[in-house]
Amino acid sequence: MCGIVGYLGDRQAYDILIKGLKRLEYRGYDSAGVAMIDEGDFRLFKCKGKVSDLEDNVGVKVNTGNVGIGHTRWATHGPPNDVNAHPHLSNDGSLVLIHNGIIENYASLKAELINRGHTFKSDTDTEVLVHFIEDIRDKTGANLFDAVRIALSEVIGAYAIVILDKSNPNQMIAARKSSPLVIGVGKDNEFFIASDATPIIEYTRNVVYLEDEEIARLDRTEGLKIVTISNQNKDPYVQELEMKLEAIEKGGYDSFMLKEIHEQPRSINDSIRGRMSLATGAVRMSGVDEHEDRWNKATRILIVACGTSWHAGLVAEYLFEEFARIPVEVEYASEFRYRNPVIYPTDVVIAISQSGETADTLAAIEMAKEKGAFIFGVCNVVGSSIARATHSGAYTHAGPEIGVASTKAFTAQVSVLYLLALSVAMHRGVMKQERLNRLMAELNSVPEKIAEVLKTNDAVKAIASIYKDSTNALYLGRGYSFPVALEGALKLKEISYIHAEGYPAAEMKHGPIALIDENMPVFVIATHGASYEKVVSNIQEVKARKGNIIAIVTEGDKVVKELADHVIEIPKSDDSLVPLISVIPLQLLSYHVAVMRGCNVDQPRNLAKSVTVE
Ligand code: F6R
């Protein structure tokens, strides 16, 4: 949460900062701000609202300063307002800082600083940090680089920071712990810095990912220097970015969410390509092949994740139990880590995360690692904290997901987890080659089937227009479709603000059925498969109470068509692959409802893409 950007070079900083902030706005959009150094002083602009509000606020284009920092905020300490917006100044105004994360011991540091004569304007932990750094610099006589290092050794919490000293326009200091930072290295000591690579790629492809507890000094004459908090020198490891510029632009769509929904045939293909061969009948997951022993000896799989990634984990539970015959437990990372769970060294922990930065998932990994479990990551963001904290893993290759509501990341996760379950099943010798061949062929045809489903867009839009003013909605599914019901409900509530709940269809009669009346839309995944007849009975129960049924059915279905108010047909597939296909109309439906209600689908209220606080 919160987006950070910085520039140091020969160009005008302001335009680079604003453009960068727009790319990072998915990380938080409560307030925005920039600070540049001009003739020995800061030019500081900040306000509540989005980056476009900041631009309006600044008014005339500011063309001043070749060094600057910018921030877009997801509020933690203090409400979103002009004063709490970043950047924050130190007590004497000589330093300015932007921060992503939470300083947990800020209250005790603040009390100490107040005793020492500091006064604060905002409610933020960030302002405390910049005062603390100034205080250490003044107390010890250290230069800024050392003062930052000493201050951070006393800070508890998570941070990515960038700090400027107005008396030195040739230098920028940055540091990170549990929040991402990437440095772009241009020619002749030109530097860019950001929470992810998207603000950087059009200027340079050479990047250095800062590691936890590292502090970087970016200097126009002396170049890049990195030290650890314990003052060890580190050689910067410069890598080449593979990301394409088109991947982070809307490409003609009205929103990133719509673009990302439509990208799914491609993103699934990219996630499975090269990992299975229909010709040789082999699944190749290097994270299983290279750690065969850990997977073969595993007595249990624990899956940790949050939100949509947790739903992908639920699908994986069914897959692993069915294909690989290993018991699986799926855990909310936030609950798991605080429960003192029993973890054995023979456990395999799968951590699923699109961003690779989710604080709860990261903490759950660290805990399971300490207890000797083998940790496998399924992440979308290359080089992210979770990808680096795990023993092994598989990237999802969905490409950058910018819409806050997860769509293509979910289907990419399920596709990768599908191959993972097949691979583990083969290694453990519990799946016949014939079945593997059939399932691989079915998986291979999923992108084409999704392309077909995307053609139902207009029909889905028409259904959305009927139910857009609902205040509640229920989503039902059984077996593999239960996690999809949860995901459908989450998509609707997070972007349209309609209250929605997902339930296993059979659980409805144990309580939620009381909610059903003629105003309640009930979305049911009723595809042909193991529990089809049972779901038909659940539909009858809803109809008997005058609920409105919107059913997702298999092409050619007759029975549900008779009962339902609306049906959306999807191509036939193996039960285990239905989640990948049935989720598509539910994503489209949420999208259209939200647009019709005038909501910002890419940046829903109160949310942020990357949840780096616990
Ligand atoms: C919902 C959504 C969130 C995320 C959750 C975990 O659409 O996007 O629920 O799935 O915050 O994020 P990652 O996958 O980045 O760990």
Image (spheres, rainbow, N blue to C red):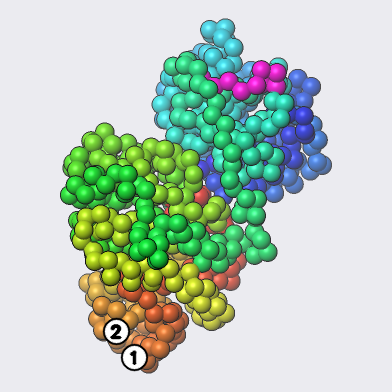
Task: Name, please, the residue furthest toward the front.
Answer: 280
- The segment highlighted magenta reads 219-227
Q: Nearer the viewer, residue 75 or 460?
A: 460
Mark 1 burial class by Cα count in 10 Å: few <14, some 14-19, many 20+: few
Name the quarter where the C terminus is drawn.
Answer: top left
Q: Nearer the viewer, residue 59 or 611?
A: 611
Query: What residue is at 20 percent from the left and 39 percent from the top?
Result: 345
Query: What residue is at 59 percent from the left and 63 percent from the top?
Result: 259
Q: Amino acid at mark 1?
A: Val
Q: Amino acid at mark 2?
A: Val
Q: Residue beneath label 1, please? A: 559
> Disc 2, disc 1: CB below 8 Å?
yes
Q: Say which element carries label 1.
A: helix
Label drawn at residue 536: 2
Label drawn at residue 416: none
The answer, for residue 303, to whether it is visible in the render is yes
Provide residue 175's location: percent of width, then percent of height.
53, 27
